[in-house]
Image: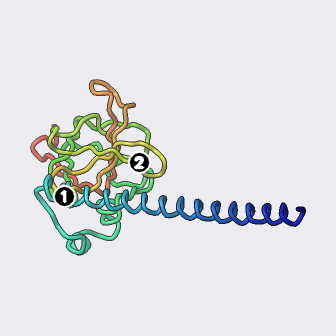
Amino acid sequence: MKKYIIFLLASLLILLFFFSSESGKSILVNISHKSDSLKNYREVKKAEVIEMKYQINKHDSEWEKELTPEQYKVLRERGTEQQFSGKFYKNHETGDYICAACGNLLFKSDTKYNSGSGWPSYWEPAADSSVVLVEDNSFGMTRTEVICARCGSHLGHVFDDGPNPTGKRYCINSISMEFDKDTAKKGK
Ligand SMILES: [Zn+2]
């Protein structure tokens, strides 16, 4: 009788071990499936956005040839330039800020203000059609990414702590832009 109970307990333990390792396995499989499908979903979505929305579609290898490594890192790999390092952070001249990748008009100097953030800041884009806003959940934060509406390049992020009249702060990397100085207004 005692032997029988020991045998039963041993069988139970073996069964428990078997089931726990099996469920462990299936959880792992599920997680990897989930991340795979999310990854695929993101890639498909990105490809569709590029194909459907942007006038200028270039292969990464083309962008790599046309842009400097620093520009490529920010514009095409969604990087961020170092705070207070950008060439336009303290630019107070009158003119237009255009996309460094495609020349699209992005921001005008009369909406630029000093946010103290260390990046050029604007309270409004040159036109609603200048940029595309996309939810960005990278680095465990929910932010709104600002993208060039013509070529899909990464420009920066927009936040809700800007000044009047919009209350928005378009926080943009200098390296994502070129400055087109308004020579007509020069000297005024
Ligand atoms: Zn562009």
Q: Is residue 23 above or below residue 158?
A: below
Name which residue type carries label 2.
Asn
* Distance from mark 1 CB to nearest ligand 1 atom below 8 Å: no
Q: In the drawing, does residue 160 fall left or right of residue 166?
A: right
Instruction: Return the residue nearer the eye: 33 or 152.
Output: 33
Q: Which mark is residue 16?
A: none
Comparing 89 with 14, the one in front is 14
The local secondary structure at tag 2 comes to loop
Q: Residue at x 10, y 56 (%)?
A: 55
Label 1 Cα neighbours within 10 Å, binned few <14 / some 14-19 / many ≥20: some
Residue 124's x, y, as percent?
24, 35
Kind of residue sitting beneath label 1: Ile
Q: Is residue 141 left or right of residue 148?
A: right
Mark 2 crowd level (few <14, some 14–19, many ≥20, 10 Å Cα): few
Q: Quadrant of the C terminus?
A: top left
Mark 1 or mark 2, which is nearer the start of the sequence?
Answer: 1
Task: Label 1, secondary structure: give it.
Answer: helix
Q: Label 1 belongs to which residue?
A: 50
**Is residue 90 visible from the viewing direction of this image?**
no
Q: Which residue is mark 2?
A: 137
User: Which quadrant holds residue 125?
Assistant: top left
> Can you see residue 109?
yes
Residue placed furthest toward the top: 165
User: Which of the 4 image quarters holds residue 168?
Assistant: top left
